[in-house]
Image (cartoon, helix red, strand yellow):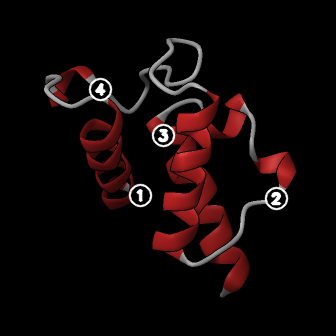
Amino acid sequence: MQDIIEAVKQYIIEKHLPGEDPKALTPTTPLISSGILNSLATLDLVAFLEARYGFELESHDLDESRLGTLTTIAELVQSKKVGRA
């Protein structure tokens, strides 16, 4: 799961937080409620996850409980990967 967290963290920092200290983005940092990800950035993240990990997210996957932190995103990715196995 740590590899997923690091990949998503790197993507968010490069795409949406250029120049920010990577240490400030922890696995439990709120991404949506803090404003790091707005609606367009969230859609961009979804496209990244689908392309990188090879699955499609359903509409019920696209809420703060599943995309709210790096940890919940990694858990979502893992659950989708297991579902395909």
Seen from the viewer's position, the closer of residues 21 and 5 is: 21
The quadrant the C terminus occupies is bottom right
What distance separates the C-alpha of mark 2 from that of mark 4? 26 Å
Residue at the (66%, 63%) spot, across then down? 79
Sequence-first disc among 1 and 4: 1
The quadrant the N terminus occupies is bottom left
Residue at the (59%, 35%) spot, across then down? 40
Marks 3 and 4 in Cβ contact (< 8 Å): no
Local crowd at mark 4 within 10 Å, few (<14), some, or many (≥20)?
some
What distance separates the C-alpha of mark 3 from that of mark 4? 11 Å
What distance separates the C-alpha of mark 2 from that of mark 3? 19 Å
Residue at the (62%, 45%) spot, across then down? 43
Task: Specify the quadrant of the image occupied by residue 58.
Answer: bottom right
Number of the label disc, if any, that sits on residue 25: 4
Seen from the viewer's position, the closer of residues 75 and 61 is: 61
Seen from the viewer's position, the closer of residues 60 and 37 is: 37
**Amino acid on which disc 2 is placed:** Glu
- Asked if 62 appears above or below 48 in the picture, the reply is above
Sequence-first disc among 3 and 4: 4
**Amino acid on which disc 4 is placed:** Leu
Sequence-first disc among 3 and 1: 1
Residue identified by numbered label 1? 1
Residue identified by numbered label 3? 71
- Asked if 43 appears above or below 41 in the picture, the reply is below
Number of the label disc, if any, that sits on residue 58: 2
**Amino acid on which disc 3 is placed:** Thr
- Residue 69 is situated, as x and y percent measured from the top left of the image, at 51, 32
Q: Is residue 73 left or right of residue 7?
A: right
